[in-house]
Amino acid sequence: MGEGVARRIERLRRSELMCWVAVTPGGYVVGFADGGPIRAPLQGYDYELYAIYLLKGWQGCGMGLALVRALWDSVCQEGGPPYDATPP
């Protein structure tokens, strides 16, 4: 692993960013979803989905929903959302 990659990984470990990566059984990355604390104040919201990407061949098969659900679970483990929000 290059030094730049190692630094980026360490920066991600220290941040509040939550990131889930979709990987095939063969080890190929086919997508990711990330999110974290809301960046611009918006009453009633504490977290947001920053980005979700999937390779075209993996769209429409439930992988995106699985990524969003994994991110949702991470948010709930961090103590949010505090209200009657419904999971995806």
Image (cartoon, grey):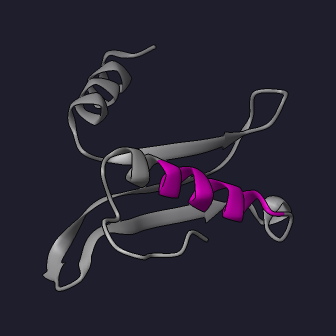
Q: Relative to residue 35, is residue 54 drawn left or right?
A: right
Q: Position of residue 45 (x, y in %)?
A: 26, 77
Quadrant for the C terminus in the image:
bottom right
Q: Residue 10, position in %: x, y?
A: 27, 24
Of residues 18 and 87, the one nearer the viewer is: 87
The residue lying at 30 percent from left, 51 percent from top is 79
Q: Is residue 53 left or right of residue 30?
A: left
Residue drawn at (75%, 27%), measured in percent from left and top?
27
Tell me: residue 59, above or below residue 72. below
Q: Residue 51: x, y in percent? A: 46, 65
The quadrant where residue 24 appears:
top right
Q: Residue furthest front?
A: 84
Placement of 74 over or under 45, stated as above or below:
above
What is the magenta range? Answer: 62-73
Q: Nearer the viewer, residue 3 or 54?
A: 54
Rendered residue at 42%/76% (across/down): 84
Quadrant hosting residue 46:
bottom left
Q: Residue furthest left?
A: 41
**Residue 47: in magenta span:** no
**Residue situated in front as seen by the camera: 88 or 5:** 88
Q: What type of secondary structure mainly makes up the magenta span?
A: helix
> In this view, which residue lies farthest toward the bottom?
43
